[in-house]
Image (spheres, rainbow, N blue to C red):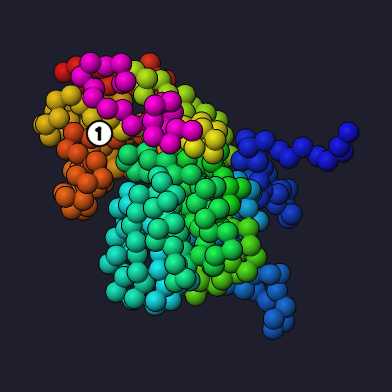
Amino acid sequence: MSNEKKPPGFSTLAVHAGVEPDPSTGAIMTPVYMTSTYVQEGIGQHKGYEYSRSSNPTRDALEAAFAALEGGRHGLAFASGLAAIDAVLMTLKPGDEVIAGDDLYGGTRRLFTTHYEPFGIQFHFVDTQDPANVAAKLNDRTRLVWLETPTNPLLRVSDIAAIAGLLAGHPARLAVDNTFATPALQNPLKEGADIVMHSVTKYLGGHSDVVMGALMTKEAALDAELRTLQNNVGAIPGPMDCFLVLRGIKTLGIRVRQHCANGRAVAEWLEAHPKVDTVFWPGFSSFPNHAAAARQMQDFGGMISFTLVDDSLDASRAVCESTRVFALAESLGGVESLIEHPALMTHASVPAEQRAALGINDSLIRLSCGIEDAEDLIADLDQAIGA
Ligand SMILES: *Cc1c(COP(=O)(O)O)cnc(C)c1O
């Protein structure tokens, strides 16, 4: 019999990771260290903290929690998801090449093409659902492969382990934006990725009250490089936001269970509705790459997109404007359910031809199922779609 200790389950980690009782008072909650500097007893004699851009105890606790949630060794907190992505891109030099998914979060693609392309970094946007498309662009200048799975808003799934396998022995790093899946459902580091990125703004924060980003890694040298960038650029979150996210992630396990249960109930109900045309949700066995999703994810999440049989802009706009429980808003991953119209809202900056090529048509509606009661979500959609 093995006497190895069983590692803690996800919800246990989410409640306890990174958090120790405060050594001076025993406070169970991590104190919010609202301080920019730290008094030194003599020059260079300090308790490990000199200036809060470099490190802050509240942020340290959160960064330790980030690492634990993804099964990594290192975590870094940034002022936003895009600031975290920017830190990864700053590790590149002119002449380097990046292979990225073609259905990325709009802000990610905008950062790549409007700021990094002019610096001489070449991007290849490919459909990463098929690893062969990544292999086709891989060459000796490739330094980064950037994946999102599932994607926004079409929930396309890419096989992380298969793409990591293509990069074995190659200097290119694999980074995965794991915002949609959350660490409760998918751990890219365990699938062979080098970097996991989160828009903490979404599920990790979970309460629509903080904008933040995170990077998780396993390699010390890569962590050191990114930590230097975090300090040199200074796109760090403040201690109060770190506290809110430490509080938010305590319930990540239980929240994601409810997001998934509601996502499943809503997706199945939509699929059977006569006025609904296509439902995009990776839990359907007929969904493209469902097998990869079922292997690399614990469950399929609360994000769903769908189109209507009446594919006019007016029909989908009317549904988005008639819900009462689902709030009409951008963003996702909070406890409250949201509805939005990608072509008019989150993806309006994507040129119409490109939207059409990707399959984001004018009838597409995206849902972020919150943690309310599934019957109330379904009743709300029923009145909005029926109207
Ligand atoms: C929101 C989001 C981002 C950007 O994160 P911010 O916190 O808004 O900067 C990146 N990727 C995905 C998948 C997102 O949903």
Q: Quadrant of residue 307?
A: top left
Residue bearing mark 1 = 365
Q: Split into 4 quadrants, where in the image is the N terminus?
A: top right
Horizontal side of residue 51 vs 283, given as left or right: right
Q: Quadrant of residue 125?
A: bottom left
Q: Position of residue 54 (x, y in %)?
A: 56, 70
Residue at image position (55%, 53%) is: 165
Q: Position of residue 38 (x, y in %)?
A: 62, 71
Residue 237 in magenta stretch: no
Looking at the image, which residue sits at the far bottom?
A: 43
Horizontal side of residue 93 vs 57, given as left or right: left
Q: Which residues are magenta?
A: 270-291
Residue 280 in magenta stretch: yes
Residue at image position (16%, 33%) is: 317
Q: Quadrant of residue 183?
A: top right
Q: Three-letter amino acid code at disc 1?
A: Ile
- In the foreground, 349 or 100: 100
Q: Position of residue 31 (x, y in %)?
A: 61, 52
